Amino acid sequence: MISINENYLKLQSSYLFSEIAKRVSAFQDANPDVKVIKLGIGDVTRALPQSCIKAFHSAIDEMAGNSTFKGYGPEQGYPFLREKIAEHDFQSRAAEITPDEIFVSDGAKCDSGNIQEIFSSDITIAVPDPVYPVYVDTNVMAGRTGKFSNGRYEKIVYLESSEENGFIPDLPKEPVDLIYLCFPNNPTGTTITKSLLKTWVEFARENKALILYDAAYEAFIRDDSLPVSIYEIEGSREVAIEFRSFSKTAGFTGTRCAYTVVPESCIGYDSNGGKHSLHSLWNRRHTTKFNGVSYPVQRAAEAIYSEKGKIEVKNLNDYYLKNAGLIRQEIDKLGYKHVGGENSPYIWVKCNMDSWKFFDLLLKKAGVVCTPGAGFGKCGQGFIRLSAFNNFENVQKAMIRIGKILNR
Ligand code: PLP
């Protein structure tokens, strides 16, 4: 008899985006003349930078010649890309990361989901609330949680992000083993200071815990005092793994390239307390189960580190940040509390009513789609997420429509 992994039965259906799609399509059927504007999605809308396109094309041309053709590449990524990443994303910020510590992959979603495989199934995990759902669901699949009741899984330590703590969770009151942090945050758009991040690193060191730091949105940070990488914090190399992605940084959501940093000195423990290199474990996992990112995609990713590529990437993200600035300004005028949108493409708005009710109000009265905060966790109730991933003209139109219905 083929038995199933019953942990899958504990999973809640991915209700959020299917429910949004259902409500939007019902509205659109009833109101075919309304041009709905989507400020709900977390997907980029603008073309790849020209430098990436050029590098992509020329790498494809290489695949057309027998002498330049590439077959299987190194699973961890080609040295040309790993070297550029180490130099530009880390060493330039005094974060001592070497090319060997970088694992190129096809997504931060896959990596942040797969990484838990190298840890024991009986560790205690701590996840923020609200949260990017992948961290939770992959641990449910692995059997680290109990059942779902009252909007939460048993055995998970939830790190609440609320108005009271400025949407930066407090340190856990109990010992935990694996901590998920994400800054700039999805969904709240908040960022963390170096001094606060240092308290997390110290907590991890004191508790022999590990931080999984998701920095998928780091390219939106404009405040130079904020940490872009956790490795800017002293002592983090032993207790942190970092996820990065070209998805939001350079519009690669449909092209697929990301990477994970596992420092050589990052340590995990066996049941006798013996120390083991997490770098070796992840290397084993990655090379066994992953085939590497295609050569042309890695060449396209490498192009963001050229002088021209850097300018194009900055302009690309400045475009979305301008949208975010407009959203913040208009929401502010309407008297609604909000955070995010300064160093992030997401704005988290307190809606003073049930998230889904507010969603329906914006959809039905303004023809604008947002994401109800309740879909990201219990603490998201009463909030919505507005996304700056759209074109400026649409954002302008959306904010005029929202202004008309919410003006008090
Ligand atoms: N991490 C966070 C916090 C995200 O919001 C997303 C995508 O929305 C990802 C990771 C996924 O990145 P990728 O496209 O590289 O899989």
Image (tube, rainbow, N blue to C red):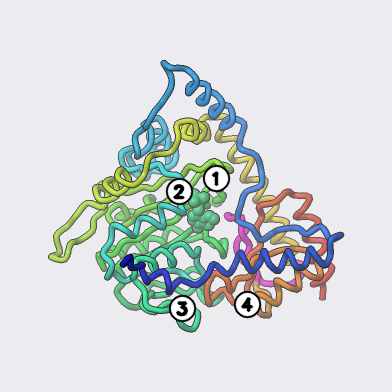
Q: Position of residue 302 (x, y in %)?
A: 48, 33
The answer to whether residue 359 is above or below residue 88 is: below
The answer to whether residue 292 is above or below residue 276 is: above
Q: In which quarter of the view is residue 254 placed?
A: top right
**Farthest residue, direction bottom:** 150
Q: CA distance from mark 3 to mark 4?
A: 17 Å
Looking at the rendered image, the disc whose residue lies closer to the viewer, 2 or 3, is 3
Q: Which residues are magenta?
A: 333-349
Check residue 382 in the rendering and tell me which mark sits there, or answer none: 4
> Which residue was labeled with disc 1?
249
User: What amino acid type is highlighted by mark number 4?
Assistant: Gly
> Which residue was labeled with disc 3?
152
Q: Earlier in the sequence, mark 2 or mark 1?
A: 2
- For the residues bearing labels 2 and 4, Cβ distance under 8 angstroms: no
* Mark 1 residue's CB less than 8 Å from ligand 1: no
User: What amino acid type is highlighted by mark number 2?
Assistant: Arg
* Mark 4 residue's CB less than 8 Å from ligand 1: no
In-image side of 211 versus 361 (left or right) = left
Q: Mark 2 Cα within 10 Å, few/some/many (few <14, many 20+)?
A: many
Q: In which quarter of the view is residue 74 placed?
A: top left
Q: Residue 264 lies in magenta, yes or no?
A: no
Q: Position of residue 362 (x, y in %)?
A: 75, 69
Q: Residue 342 lies in magenta, yes or no?
A: yes
Q: CA distance from mark 2 to mark 3?
A: 27 Å
- For the residues bearing labels 1 and 3, Cβ distance under 8 angstroms: no
